[in-house]
Amino acid sequence: MDSLIDLMPELWIAAGETLYIVGLTLFFGGIGGLLVGLGLYLTRAGSILENRGVFVVLNLLVNIVRPIPFIIFLAAAQPLARVVVGTGIGNAAIIFTISLAASFAMGRIVEQNLLTVTPGVIEAARSVGAGPIRIIFTVLLPEALGPLILGYTFIFVALVDMSAVAGYVGGGGLGNFALLYGYRQFNPVVTWAAVLLIIVLVQLVQFLGNWLARKAFRR
């Protein structure tokens, strides 16, 4: 316990780094996932921008990237991270790699949630002359808002899990803290302190996501 008290400043720094990493990856990965999901939904057969070629390519990319274990994807994407952010290690590299992986994972979730929108609503908008852009922003996304919020809440938990391996490429965060000061020092108290902090963080975000989703469903 004394060792944990001594490490409290490092614990809070690690918590801040986790929030920083997860916050940015949720932003970039969320935008990427929304674009991928919209692309899958809009170009599928019978949709408003049907395009078999685009759909097949996007669907194939999602199916290839999603099943790859993140620790393997992290190593495989390191050369690309060096090209894009100038380094293959550190928080910048981990943010890029997680955002890339999250884009494809979130893309499938977005597509599935958009498919819950009643086709009749889309057809009604098309019948009054609404174009694709207007349908997307005034009908499709508002109708799917509740499920999308729950989907993004779910992906937040996955991002926390991904950020825990940041230490393997020189990144920070609670996962690195638990490995460095807990697991490698044979100190389970420190490890569990990091675990409990992660649990609290996830529960708070889950509560917020559920609350926002309920507000969206009651519109």
Image (cartoon, grey):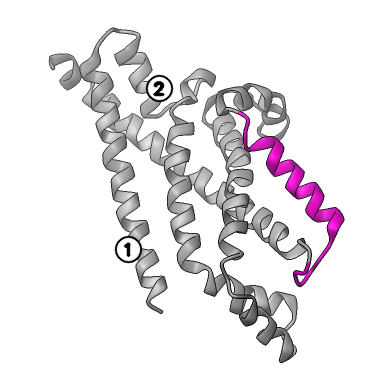
For the point 56% across and 28% down, the residue is: 70
Instruction: Give the crowd class for mark 2: few <14, some 14-19, many >=20 residues within 10 Å.
Output: many
On the picture, is 104 further left or further right than 12?
right
Q: What x and y, as percent, mark residue 27? A: 53, 51
Residue behind mark 1: 211
On the picture, is 196 further left or further right than 116?
left
In this view, 134 is above or below 62: below
Q: Secondary structure at mark 2?
A: helix
Q: What x and y, as percent, mark residue 61? A: 74, 42
Q: Earlier in the sequence, mark 2 or mark 1?
A: 2
Q: Amino acid at mark 1?
A: Trp
Residue behind mark 2: 176
Q: Amino acid at mark 2?
A: Asn
For the point 43% across and 28% down, the residue is: 164
Q: What x and y, as percent, mark residue 139? A: 60, 78
Q: What x and y, as percent, mark residue 85? A: 66, 34
Q: Secondary structure at mark 1?
A: helix
